[in-house]
Image (tube, helix red, strand yellow):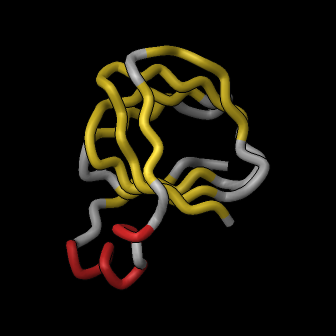
Amino acid sequence: MKIIIEKLTAEELETKGVFHWPIWSCEISKFPWSYPDKESCYLIEGKIEVTTSLEIVTMFAGDFIVFPLGIFCTWNVLQAVMKHYSMG
């Protein structure tokens, strides 16, 4: 299971309804996390390094990210984060 990171156009984000999804935010921190559901999110601001058993991925503001169902990881929030997200 790999994390997918894409750069989507404003039109693609609008088509997906991203700007109507809930917002989650977090200050600089480090914590374990798991995904009981698939999560899609759009990083409004911040920088995160996510470590899984397969990879270390760095995410930046403007990234559209898909975390697969069942993935276990460690979030290292390097710059305060704000994101739109959708589960399932």
Q: Which residue is at 53% across, 25% downward?
A: 75
The one of 73 and 21 positioned closer to us in this rendering: 21
Q: Which residue is at 64% across, 61% downward?
A: 87
Q: Quadrant of residue 49?
A: top left
Does residue 34 appear left or right of residue 59 in this picture? right
* Residue 46, horizontal then vertical, whole percent: 29, 33
* Residue 82, horizontal then vertical, whole percent: 36, 41
Q: Which residue is at 44% across, 29% downward?
A: 26
Above or below: residue 54 compared with residue 88: above
The quadrant the C terminus occupies is bottom right
Q: Quadrant of residue 86?
A: bottom right
The one of 82 and 65 positioned closer to us in this rendering: 82
Above or below: residue 43 compared with residue 72: below
Does residue 4 appear left or right of residue 31 in this picture? left
Residue at the limit of the structure toward the left, as seen here: 10
Above or below: residue 15 compared with residue 25: below
Q: Which residue is at 39% across, 47% downward?
A: 83
